[in-house]
Image (tube, grey):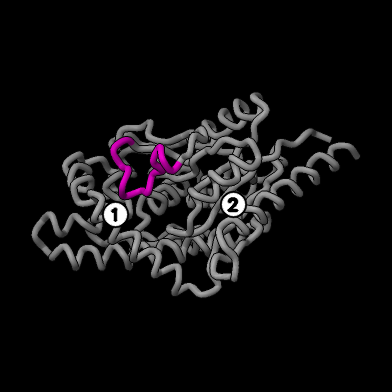
Amino acid sequence: MREKILVAGVVGPTASGKTRLGVALAKRLDGEVISADSMQVYKGMTVGTAKPTQEEMEGVPHHLLDFLDPGEAFSVAAWCDLAREKIAEITGRGKLPILVGGTGLYISSLLNHIQFAPLQSDPALREELQKRAEKEGGEGLLEELRSFDPSSASALHPNNLGRIIRAIEVYRLTGVPMSRQQQEARAKPSPYHPAVVGLAFRNRALLYERIDRRVDEMLENGLCEEAREIYRSGGKTALQAIGYKELFPYFEGECSLTQAADKLKMETRRYAKRQMTWFKREQWVHWLYLDDERNFQAIADEAAKWVEMQGLLCYNNQQV
């Protein structure tokens, strides 16, 4: 039996407290954090992505943060390659790797050991699809994707233009739907034993209240200034990020700051709902509910016990 590597994780919707719990686990279990957030990789996107501060890290090493310029493209395959390297480095030091973030595609692809086919791309086709998206909106492209790959289409929001365009491009170039390619990519067993804790709320209204408060705090902490810099930079990926694009109409004089903030809160709530839908599909997530009658220390203790139990299970399976 191939020896598996224990990889812990903290997942869940935005504003659920993943950063804090990730640090608590690292301190309890001698671990290091690997960020699993598709936007925290970018420099200058700090307030809007809730990137952890040095104070919040509490001395725990954090990896895959703040290393790309906002104009640079980045992919799930590239993140998985980097995450694998970091896992090897961290375990080589005798530490526990802990994935912390809300980008479900990244975490699932890594832990399920998705094998990415060599990248095929057609710049002319992508430009054509991008122009169609600008003219028709995302719904038209999503409907086209639904006609030949309903599985991929059901997992995407009309605003997620990058992934919709990529799914259409893959099918046009290969004749094979992306969902089938992803299914086939799961054929090889994963080298990782996941010990992932998910944070959630039984009463979703409580999560939405936290999201609204977080947006207000971000605006107080300089989100407008940061978003204006992103707006001026013109980086395609950054311009699509929730937390920034909702403020662009305000910069263009099309709405008030209050209206833009309300739009940001609404889009963030929708994003949180999509995150929960994604992570609920993964059987390896152990859910902890923040609105149960427990304080943070009790939740952190339970999370640590769960990870330790999975570590023993991983070890015992390898002794069989």
The residue at which mark 2 appears reads as 180
Q: Is residue 319 above or below residue 246?
A: above
Mark 2 residue element: helix
Q: Position of residue 308 (x, y in %)?
A: 73, 46
Which secondary structure is most common in the magenta stretch? loop
Q: What's the residue type where badge 1 is placed?
A: Met
Crowding near pointer 1: few (<14 within 10 Å), some, many (20+)? some
Quadrant of the rendered image containing residue 65: top left
| Identity, as a three-letter code, of the amino acid under mark 2 | Arg
> Magenta segment range?
43-56
The image shows residue 279 at horizontal and vertical percentages of 57, 58
Answer with mark 2 or mark 1, whichever residue precedes in sequence: 2
Q: Callout 1: helix, strand or loop? A: helix
Does residue 215 appear in the picture of this structure? yes
- Outermost residue on the right side: it is 320
Q: Residue shown at 80%/44% (left/top)? A: 312
Residue 311 included in the magenta stretch of the image:
no
Structural crowding at the residue carrying mark 2, measured as other residues with C-alpha within 10 Å and reported as few (<14), some (14–19) or many (≥20): few
**According to the image, label 1 marks what residue?**
218
Depth check, front residue: 269 or 131: 269
